[in-house]
Image (tube, rainbow, N blue to C red):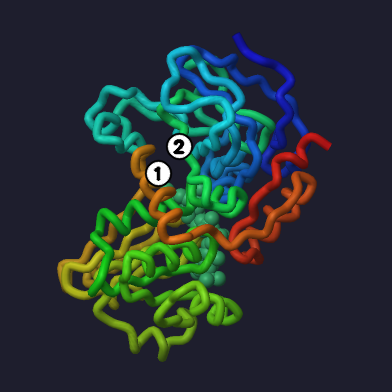
Amino acid sequence: MNTPNIKAFGTDAAEAPLKHLNIQRRSVTPHDIQIEILYCGICHSDLHAVRDEWGGTKYPIVPGHEIVGRVTAVGNQVKNFKVGDLAGVGCIVDSCHECDYCKAGEEQFCENGNTIVFNSPDKISGGVTYGGFSETIVVDKNYGVHIPETLDLASAAPILCAGITVYSPFKHWKVGPGKKVGIIGIGGLGHIAIKIAKAMRAYVTVFTTSNSKADDAKRLGADEVVLSTDKQQMKAQSKFDMILDTVSAKHNVNDYLRILKVDGSLVLVGLPVDPLPVGAFNVVHGRKSFSGSNIGGIRETQEVLDFCAVHRITADIELIRVNQINEAFDRLQKGDVKYRFVVDMGSLKN
Ligand code: NAP
Ligand code: ZN
């Protein structure tokens, strides 16, 4: 059974602006929680998907995958949430529960195909899933996370994607004291990566194409800021253990492979449309790795939320209303945001 007439904001075509839509959500099953959505961040992945830059977008699409809200109903088998709790939903809303990766809490690698919060075939109610630019969402209890009460709700929303996407590789590549870490791009992911890497007590160098963001990078905690368009400044860099690449567009990764130490890793989280050519000598010399990382599992998403609560980390946000979403997407395309748009979803009602 589905509940019709849920208010949402999305689009019917790649070229068309987003507008008010009505969608259906499944009715709450015994294993589900229903959440009234209070805030939803805007990630560059929403923009890539809405504009069909990766191909394969199905319309209508309702984006949004940095969701924070309050639980309004729970199924009779739900023990980990109660009505009135704060809850968050990120990219993953279902997976097979059975493969080795799901059992290990790495649902992002589910061997049988996970369900992404929007634009994924919905195995339970049919059709495709719709994301967080809407009044409510219904998810299986195991795919919701708890939002620590001490975090500001609007600026905590970006932790659900930007936060976990940078935290997971930092954990995997053992970022910590004595490690020299680079972060490329000061956008939604990059700015929160600076805060998290500093909280992990690494030495952090930020690479930016925007001179205007240099002071901010220091304020956010960076030890050094490098203007990546300046050849002299780039030449002076060396011996990074790990460099996290958050850039959303085509760029030259060889500049960064060259400045890794022996056995160092350049880790891509940005998802530019065009391939990124790698010069063989830049990885062969120094046994370097060019790798990637994809969000993180549900357990680790809870872990990063708790980590952020302990270290008092949230995103620097511009809080907007639903009717400003199209302008926000245009500004995000131009890199004109400091540093994450978050939508007040209450504004969908009026
Ligand atoms: P964003 O806020 O737009 O930030 C991207 C930053 O990249 C910009 O602020 C800019 O930083 C830099 N940049 C942009 N164009 C560039 C160019 N042509 N050359 C060099 N630098 C450029 O985007 P975001 O939300 O952080 O997302 C970043 C990327 O990560 C997107 O591709 C998104 O789809 C992807 N993503 C991946 C995952 C995953 O699981 N792997 C999860 C979430 C997002 P400066 O001004 O400082 O240079
Ligand atoms: Zn995202």
**Would you say the residues marked 2 and 1 are in contact, meaning their CB atoms lie under 8 Å apart?**
yes
Q: Is residue 333 left or right of residue 184?
A: right
Q: Residues within 10 Å of mark 1 (few under 14, many from 20)?
A: many
* Image position of 229 with respect to 55: above or below: below
Residue that badge 2 annotates: 145
* Image position of 58 with respect to 342: above or below: above
Q: Is residue 273 left or right of residue 2?
A: left
- Nearer the observer, 99 or 301: 301
The C terminus lies in quadrant: top right
* Residue 301 tag number: 1
Q: Is label 1 within 8 A of ligand 1 (CB to nearest ligand atom)?
A: no
State the residue at coordinates (29%, 77%).
Answer: 259
Q: Position of residue 116 (x, y in %)?
A: 48, 33
Residue 235 image-quadrant placement: bottom left
| Amino acid carrying mark 1 in the image | Thr
Q: Is label 2 within 8 A of ligand 2 (CB to nearest ligand atom)?
A: no
Q: Is residue 160 left or right of residue 203?
A: right
* Residue 170 tag number: none
Question: Which type of secondary structure does the marked residue at label 2 adopt?
Answer: loop
Q: Earlier in the sequence, mark 2 or mark 1?
A: 2
Q: CA distance from mark 2 to mark 1?
A: 7 Å
Question: Which type of secondary structure does the marked residue at label 1 adopt?
Answer: helix
| Amino acid carrying mark 2 in the image | Val
Q: Position of residue 338 (x, y in %)?
A: 62, 66
State the residue at coordinates (22%, 68%).
Answer: 264
Q: Is residue 89 visible?
A: yes
Q: Residues within 10 Å of mark 2 (few under 14, many from 20)?
A: many
State the residue at coordinates (71%, 24%).
Answer: 6
The N terminus lies in quadrant: top right
* Image position of 32 with respect to 335: above or below: above
Q: Is residue 273 visible?
A: no
